[in-house]
Amino acid sequence: MKFSEQLSLEIYQKEKKGLEALKSYSGAMIPKVFGYGEYEQHSYLLMEYVATTNPSSKSWEQLAEQMATMHTVSERYFGWDTANFIGSLPQSNATKDHWADFYSEERLKVQVGKALYEETYLQRWQTSRPES
């Protein structure tokens, strides 16, 4: 279960949709989402438990194969049918005909622009990173 006092329910709604899309595109172990909601002043996402193990050469190879399989899915455009989030930060997925256009306009331009022009955005990013 993931829960937060700060994150809106919409974030978990979009995460559920994203996890379901990933599951449909790959054989990777993507946790099943049982639901999301609000309880008192917290929003939550309830998912299947996935046990972790220590990484091995074989597990890294399997991950690489699963990622490659997921990236063989092709569409006529780059992007997605809905906006979502990078952590708590809004993320546009407006479609583009070319990958380079999508990546530069919907990822780099937006994130760099926010970091440069919105001090609170940069502060939120800095506080969301774990200490080194």
Image (cartoon, helix red, strand yellow):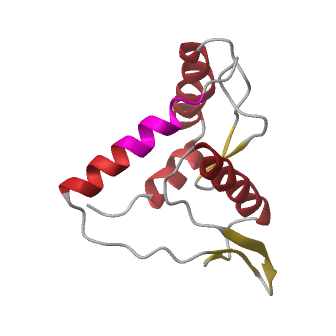
Quarter of the image that includes the N terminus = bottom right
Query: Residue placed farthest to the bottom in the image?
Result: 40
Residue 66 sits inside the magenta stretch: yes
Q: Main secondary structure of the magenta part?
A: helix
Left or right: 45 with respect to 99? right
> Which is nearer the eye, 132 or 59?
59
Q: Is residue 69 above or below residue 12?
A: above
Residue 26 sits inside the magenta stretch: no
Q: Is residue 96 above or below residue 115?
A: above
Magenta residues, start to end: 65-73
Left or right: 51 with respect to 105? left
The quarter holding residue 83 reads top right
Q: Position of residue 51 (x, y in %)?
A: 42, 76
Q: Which residue sits at x=73%, y=53%?
A: 17
Q: Is residue 2 above or below residue 116?
A: below
Q: Which residue sits at x=68%, y=68%?
A: 33
